Amino acid sequence: MLAGCWWFFGVLTQPLVEFLIAGEKWIDCFNIMLILFAAPGGIAVCFGFCLTKEKTKKNIKANVGLLVSFVALILVGSVKLPWGLNHISSSSRLLLITIVAILIYIPVSRFLMLREGLIPKPKGEFVGKGIILIIAVQIWLAGTEIARAYLPKDFAAREWIIGDSIKVIAPILIALIFYKVAMKFIQEDKTEQTTREKPAAN
């Protein structure tokens, strides 16, 4: 809840001061993108309040996920990557940080669940369709930026169609293949759990 308040007021403080003190017009200080960027802070406060009322697996995962997301968003533009990776594109940087964030989110959520006496599922508890879709979109964006940066820009006229196809279609295919394969594993996990939980026939 504190992190949500910090995020919400941190985003809106400067526009609010300009509106109240500098006498700027509301439309000049606030816009829909600014309000949307501040919205995760309000959502975090609501999720934190729900967690104080009931410590369920859903509430634990929601709060840990939001906290990790806040940290990831801050790190995207401020942290220098090791091993000479600072030259990579913003989308590739976001993809790497997202993967690291998920690797932190899973053990922290599992630890808090066990601490509250909640038993996580053997499979499919922490990575669902939403996370898979987010990663797939980031793979597409990162692949597009990488293709534009590293493929030759001086294609001949006859090679233009091939080069343009690689830049546009290849990242989409890679992201789609990742999404299909990951979702297949998730569906197999759900099938196994349903079969395991189904009572034996008399």
Image: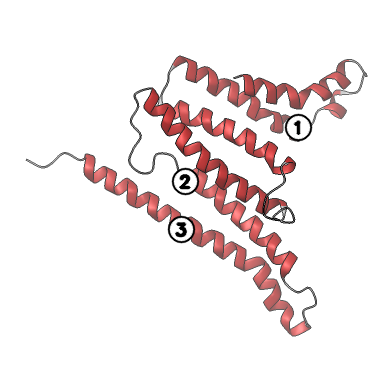
Q: Which residue is mark 2?
A: 129
Q: Which residue is mark 1?
A: 34
Sequence order check: which comes first, mark 3 or mark 2?
A: 2
What residue sits 69% from the left and 26% below the top?
Answer: 7
Are the residues flagged by discs 2 and 1 in contact, CB closer than 8 Å?
Answer: no
Q: Secondary structure at mark 3?
A: helix
Q: Secondary structure at mark 1?
A: helix
Graded by Cα atoms within 10 Å as few (under 14), some (14 to 19) or many (20 or more), the crowding at tag 1 reads few
To which quarter of the image does residue 119 belong?
Answer: top left
Tell me the kind of residue under disc 3.
Answer: Lys
What residue sits 88% from the left and 21% below the top?
Answer: 18
Q: Which residue is mark 3?
A: 180
Q: Is residue 77 above or below residue 91?
A: above
Q: CA distance from mark 1 to mark 3?
A: 34 Å
Instruction: Using residue 16 as the reference point, say whether residue 65 is left or right of it.
Output: left
What residue sits 59% from the left and 45% below the top?
Answer: 98
Q: CA distance from mark 3 to mark 2?
A: 11 Å
- In percent of width and height, residue 146 lies at 69, 62
Sequence order check: which comes first, mark 1 or mark 3?
A: 1
Q: CA distance from mark 2 to mark 1?
A: 28 Å
Q: Which color mode does the image show?
A: secondary structure
Tell me the kind of residue under disc 2.
Answer: Lys
Sequence order check: which comes first, mark 2 or mark 1?
A: 1
Graded by Cα atoms within 10 Å as few (under 14), some (14 to 19) or many (20 or more), the crowding at tag 3 reads some
> Outermost residue, left direction?
202
- In percent of width and height, residue 64 lies at 52, 30
Q: If the image is split into quadrants, where does the N terminus sit?
A: top right
Q: If the image is split into quadrants, where does the C terminus sit?
A: top left
To which quarter of the image does residue 172 belong?
Answer: bottom right
Q: Secondary structure at mark 2?
A: helix
